[in-house]
Amino acid sequence: MIRRYGSALRIVLMFADLTATIALAVVLSAVLYDGSAPDIWDQAVPDPTVILFVYAMAWVALLWSRGLYRLRARWSIRSEVSEVVRTTAMMAVATISVLFLVKP
């Protein structure tokens, strides 16, 4: 049954990750900037929604490129967590590198 709807399941998982990434960025921004996040973001970048969407798409693309959306018959929680941690570290390095080059 899962193999029959495997593509649809992967798309739903990607959409859920995209939504969670955007929601987490918005919530963290609101918490870190004490409600003045829209003003700070408007001063920092021309269009913050585009930047946020590109960041979320990059996260989903990195997860996809690392094979984390493949359905596996045999998997362990430990290997899955370690792969997510590696992917998170890669995204952090990429984000810091872009921020260093752009110097907002």
Image: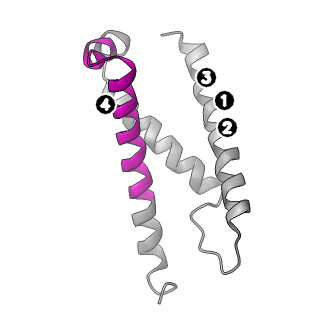
Separation of residues labelled 2 and 4 (CA atoms): 24 Å
Do the CB atoms of the residues marked 2 and 4 lie less than 8 Å apart?
no
Cα–Cα gap, marks 4 and 3: 19 Å
Q: Earlier in the sequence, mark 2 or mark 4?
A: 4
User: Which residue position holds label 2?
Assistant: 89
In the image, is residue 76 above or below residue 36?
below
Q: Does the magenta stretch include residue 36?
A: yes
Which region shows up in magenta? Answer: 14-40
Give the residue number, with chain letter if any, for mark 1: 93
Reading the image, the residue beneath label 4 is: 49
Query: Is 26 covered by the magenta stretch?
Result: yes
* Residue 24 numbered tag: none
Q: Say what amino acid the circle numbered 4 marks.
A: Thr
Q: Distance between the residues labelled 3 and 1?
A: 5 Å
Q: Is the magenta stretch mostly helix, strand or loop?
A: helix
Element carrying mark 4: helix
